[in-house]
Image (spheres, rainbow, N blue to C red):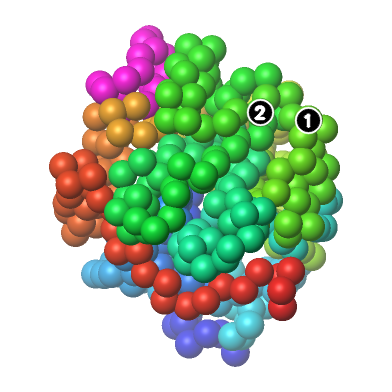
Amino acid sequence: MNLNIPNIDLPRVVIIGCGFAGLKLAQKLSSKHYQTVLLDKNNFHTFQPLMYQVASSGLEPDSIVYPIRKVFKGKKKFHFRMAAVSHVDTEAKVLHTDIGVLAYDVLVIATGAITNFFGMENIQKYGYTMKTLRASLDLRSVILQNFEKALNTSDLHERESYMNFVIVGAGATGVELAGALAELKTNVLPNDYPDLDIRQMQIHIIESSDRVLSGMSEHASSKSEKFLKRLGINIWLNTTVKDYDGETAITNAADFRTKTLIWSAGVLGAPIGNMQPTLNRANRILTDECNKVIGLEDIYAIGDVACIASEMEGRGHPMLASVAGQQGYHLGKNLNNLAKKNKEMTPFRYNDKGTMATVGRNLAVVDLPFLKFSGLIAWFVWMFLHLMLLVDFRNRLIVFVNWGWSYFKYDRGLRLIVREVRSPKHE
């Protein structure tokens, strides 16, 4: 079986994963010199930086996803297959997938990352994440279900548990979700639930380090902490979660009664299981400066799953969309040059254009190489950049209209519970 992909007189580049890295690589590869085959478990590309807005009812899922086949409509010698790769035979240069076997000349692993629970099985079982679109939709349903259940219980402790939200991890994802929940509390939920005292809702951010947004500058950390406190969010620094049973989160500082613990405290690379490449402590595949996997021929790794061994004392570049996109583009350029000019590959050099995070309406922080600022201007910069990074004009228009509506009407997207999500505690 060859997944019904024609054999032609061109080298076949197989890309596993259509995140930012895989997408940019497939777009850059020349159809004159390569046959490109893209594999992914989903038939859509997801704009993960806005996943938290889906979870908090700010955007509908179709705003941040785009069909892969539509992205590459008209690209010659390109084939997409919706498939999961089970293992790779590096000697025979063959992939084994759940829909068949596929030979490759060049293999690129861009499988991204998964949530790192640091070995805490209970948190993995009872906590919620936003790493996938399905998980974000589940979290949205859970948040809305909580208020319906809080409204119908006369037990004050039970109501408190439904209305307490504990977010573990004060990186960009945790901070942005906390801000979105605070805006729900202030502007939306009092109108949706007039019979419920929404002032009882508590939002906690738990962070093991001594500041929020520890990956950004001190200026960004201090400003974002100030913004979070202004929104009424409880910040717990130098605090680690020890356990969670679906009812109580146990930390070294205090115990929190909550039905909803949201885990955003770390990620791990998601390499293909049987390949046995050299991995770093974060489970990322070690590569050379040209993204070639160390010890393997004709195999490359890019994006969150990859780590250039010479960068950051073996930790590699940060696991950011900007890094992944630049690596995908650079590898595509390198492969094109190899084919048409027989040149040597050039090392990847990350161009750090800055980082940013939003906390809420008119509140954001931006770190640029030459400038650090916050507040309203930073918020507009954050919005503009995220709009421009969306794949398609339609997505940009939908998100822009949604944001405009939310800003002027003090309202958010459709708050629909389309399917009940049962907690593992009660299954």
Tell me residue 143's x, y (percent): 50, 59
Residue 418 vs 131, above or below: the answer is: below
Tell me residue 218's x, y (percent): 54, 12
Question: Residue type at mark 2?
Answer: Trp
Tell me residue 222's x, y (percent): 51, 15
Q: Which residue is mark 2?
A: 236
Residue drawn at point x = 39 percent, y = 58 percent: 195
The one of 350 and 107 positioned closer to us in this rendering:
350
The quarter holding residue 413 reads: bottom left
Q: Is residue 31 visible?
A: no
Tell me residue 147's x, y (percent): 48, 60
Mark 1 secondary-structure assignment: loop
What numbered label is drawn on residue 155? Answer: none
Cβ–Cβ under 8 Å for marks 1 and 2: yes
Q: Is residue 253 visible?
A: yes
Q: Where does the C terminus fall, quadrant-wise?
A: bottom right
Which of disc 2 and disc 1 is earlier in sequence?
2
Residue drawn at point x = 39 percent, y = 13 percent: 372
How many tags in the picture? 2
Q: Where does the N terminus fall, quadrant-wise?
A: bottom right
What numbered label is drawn on residue 253? Answer: 1
The one of 100 and 257 positioned closer to us in this rendering:
257
174 displayed left or right of 392 = right
**Badge 2, how many Cα within 10 Å: few under 14, some, many 20+?**
many
Task: Tell me which segment is drawn in magenta.
Answer: 364-379
Question: Residue type at mark 1?
Answer: Ala
**Badge 1, how many Cα within 10 Å: few under 14, some, many 20+?**
few
Residue 257 vs 98, above or below: the answer is: above
54 displayed left or right of 283 = left
Residue drawn at point x = 56 percent, y = 73 percent: 421
Q: Is residue 225 shown in magenta?
A: no
Mark 2 secondary-structure assignment: strand
